[in-house]
Amino acid sequence: DKAVWDIAANQKQLTQKGNCLIAGIAAKIDVLMDFQSGKPKDVAQRIAVTGKPTAGQLAAAGFDAGDVLSGEIPLTAVWSKQNGGDGEISLEADLSGAAVFVQPLAWQKPAGVAAKASARLRLSKDRLMSIDGIVADGVGASVRGSAEVANGHISAVRLDRVQLGRTDVSGIVRLPPGGPIAVAISGPMLDMAAKLVEKTTSRDKSRPEPPPGPAWTLSGNFARVHLATDVA
């Protein structure tokens, strides 16, 4: 939206560095354009963006995480494109200052507890091909996964391992264009204790019912399940 740039250029490359507003979010940008004709795998363009948006600002910019995230989330995004047309976007987020809530398990990470997340989007001629290296780590939490893409849209999310508190599972979430969403989860431990004792807030009857969400199916296979009474 607004920017102040420091630009340097010669016959080989152009660099731009500065501060700007992107969708109302203050950010620093570092741009490199290589004019030399290199090999197909050589990086021809790179743009690095860093900022400290809140979850609300990200939602207003079109990246809405719903109730999963709240608070400030320092981010670094680096887009690069090779001479051959392939490229990637690497994302890194510091979740230490954010609160994280996983609604199906009622698992939460309070703001102030160290955590981080990252992912890499694979591109071909600016079209999304796959997402790999999905990683999240924090106190009592570890996630590893990837995503499959069909026709530029995410068709499945593979969860190689999800550890949230005592929960230790893996699985896949399939997202067919016509639905329903199909979730298949299995593992040695599913902890439902917090969810089963979770207090539900009464709905304001003067407000209309929220619209129904997308249709989905769930299949699960677990060696142990912890319930509210802590009985497996």
Image (cartoon, rainbow, N blue to C red):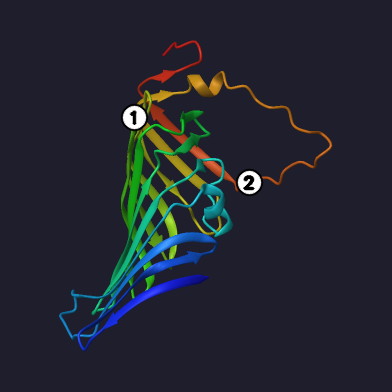
Q: Which mark is residue 209?
A: none
Q: Residues within 10 Å of mark 2 (few under 14, many from 20)?
A: few
Query: Residue 229 location, x and y as percent?
Result: 49, 10
CA gap, disc 2 to disc 1? 31 Å
Give the residue drawn at x 46%, y 71%: 3
Q: Amino acid at mark 1?
A: Val
Residue under label 2: 213
Q: Which mark is residue 139?
A: 1
- Label 2 vs label 1, nearer the camera: 1
Report whether 200 appears left or right of 207: left
Q: How many dots with numbers? A: 2
Q: Tell which residue pokes out farthest to the right in this image.
A: 206
The quadrant of the picture occupied by the C terminus is top left
Give the residue drawn at x 43%, y 57%: 155
Report whether 94 appears left or right of 197: left
- Give the mark nearer the N terminus: 2 vs 1: 1
| Corner quadrant of residue 83 | bottom left
Query: Residue 96 location, x and y as percent?
Result: 39, 38
